[in-house]
Amino acid sequence: MTYFGWLAIVIFVVGIVVKFVAWLKTPNPLNIPTQPAPIDTGGVVVRMLKEVFLFDSLRKADKYLWAGGLIFHVSFLGRIYYGAVLRFSVFPPYCQ
């Protein structure tokens, strides 16, 4: 490898380190509150289902972001349902 190749690698690594240090110093804009972990399996399952389907920790952190995210995901799921299930089973395009 030539001198310029090694110089490019050094500049790249130094740039990555500088960006990483700058990223570590930035404040966290969304502070997500944590709760005590449940101790039984049922509690873990309930908490996980609430987090997966209702974005519970996001709701506690930012109501507007939670509402927007929930509306987006529900509408996207409805679009997938319409496109995959209804379009090809109830209203097949080859029968028109």
Image (cartoon, rainbow, N blue to C red):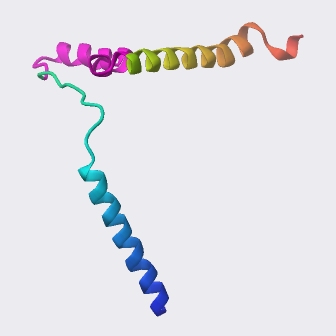
Choose top left, top right, bottom left or bottom right for residue 92: top right
Residue 46 as seen in the image, left or right of residue 16: left
Residue 91 as seen in the image, left or right of residue 73: right
Of 39 and 30, which appears nearest the observer? Answer: 30
The image shows residue 38 at horizontal and vertical percentages of: 13, 19
Give the farthest residue toward the right: 96
Q: What secondary structure predominates along the stretch shown in magenta? A: helix
- The stretch drawn in magenta includes residue 30: no
Choose top left, top right, bottom left or bottom right for residue 15: bottom left
Q: Does residue 52 sit above or below 1 in this rendering?
A: above
> Could you tell me which residue is drawn at 50 percent across and 19 percent down?
73
Magenta region: 37-63
User: Which image quadrant: the C terminus?
Assistant: top right
Q: How many marks?
A: 0
Choose top left, top right, bottom left or bottom right for residue 34: top left
> Could you tell me which residue is drawn at 13 percent across and 23 percent down?
37
The image shows residue 47 at horizontal and vertical percentages of: 24, 16
The image shows residue 22 at horizontal and vertical percentages of: 30, 56
Of 72 and 96, which appears nearest the observer? Answer: 72
> Could you tell me which residue is drawn at 27 percent across and 59 percent down?
21
The image shows residue 90 at horizontal and vertical percentages of: 73, 7
- The stretch drawn in magenta includes residue 48: yes
Q: Does residue 61 sit above or below 10 in this rendering?
A: above
Residue 47 as seen in the image, left or right of residue 2: left
Of 26 and 95, which appears nearest the observer? Answer: 26
